Image (cartoon, rainbow, N blue to C red):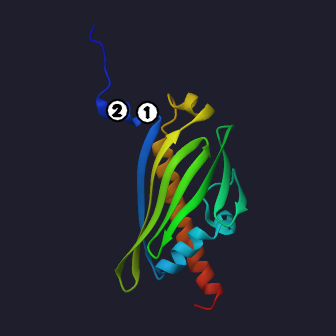
Amino acid sequence: MQEESWTEDQAKDWETTFTTRTCKKMRGVNNEQILGAVRELDNYRYWWPSSNVSFKVEDPKTLEVCTSWWGIGSCWKGRIEKTTPNEVEWNYYDGAFKGKGKWSVEKEDKDTCNVCYSSDLEVTGMAKYAENFINFGDIQNESMEKALDNLDDHLHKQKQADGG
């Protein structure tokens, strides 16, 4: 009987660090509207993709997020470190995840922007014990796909409410 062994790529899928990038094309909104929503921490509850999540805004640039997967709760804190007209960079410094995240917007044409969220994170604390049965990179990508869809919907609803 031959022993099975993981390939290097398979092993990387389950490491305690993960890197993700999720993008969506958005029409009818611009950089300032998109990144303005990302910088406005009090509004995350309107477009973040989970009903099992709570947000605590500690100051205009610091956010604590607590969520639950299958009854297992985790929290992490992030702070906006840098903003430019096309990017918002985050530093996640405490809790279940530590590392960097970045929202970026690239104008594609007059009416279309490509919006991306990328992250390079380390799983820390008690969440590390779940690494053998939870692929955090996959969960992050799925969550960010939903977040981008919800952000797009939120921005269009906001634009309609503002008469646009």
What residue lies at 51% left-to-right and 31% top-to-bottom?
131
What residue lies at 68% left-to-right and 53% top-to-bottom?
64
* Residue in front for this viewpoint, 32 or 91: 91
Residue 79, percent from left and from top: 60, 58
Answer whether labels 1 and 2 touch (C-beta < 8 Å): yes
Residue type (three-letter) at the residue carrying disc 2: Gln
* Residue in front for this viewpoint, 86 or 9: 86
From the viewer's perspective, tell me whether residue 36 is left or right of residue 105.
right
Quarter placement of the N terminus: top left
Q: How many marks?
A: 2
In what element is the residue under mark 2?
Answer: helix
In what element is the residue under mark 1?
Answer: loop
Q: Which mark is residue 10?
A: 2
Examine the rendered structure and indicate whether residue 127 appears above or below residue 90: above
Report the residue that reaches farthest toward the left.
Answer: 2
Residue 130, percent from left and from top: 56, 31
Examine the rendered structure and indicate whether residue 94 appears above or below residue 59: above
Examine the rendered structure and indicate whether residue 115 appears above or below residue 122: below
Residue 20, percent from left and from top: 42, 50
What residue lies at 71% left-to-right and 63% top-to-bottom?
59
The residue that label 1 is drawn on is: 14
Residue 72, percent from left and from top: 67, 36
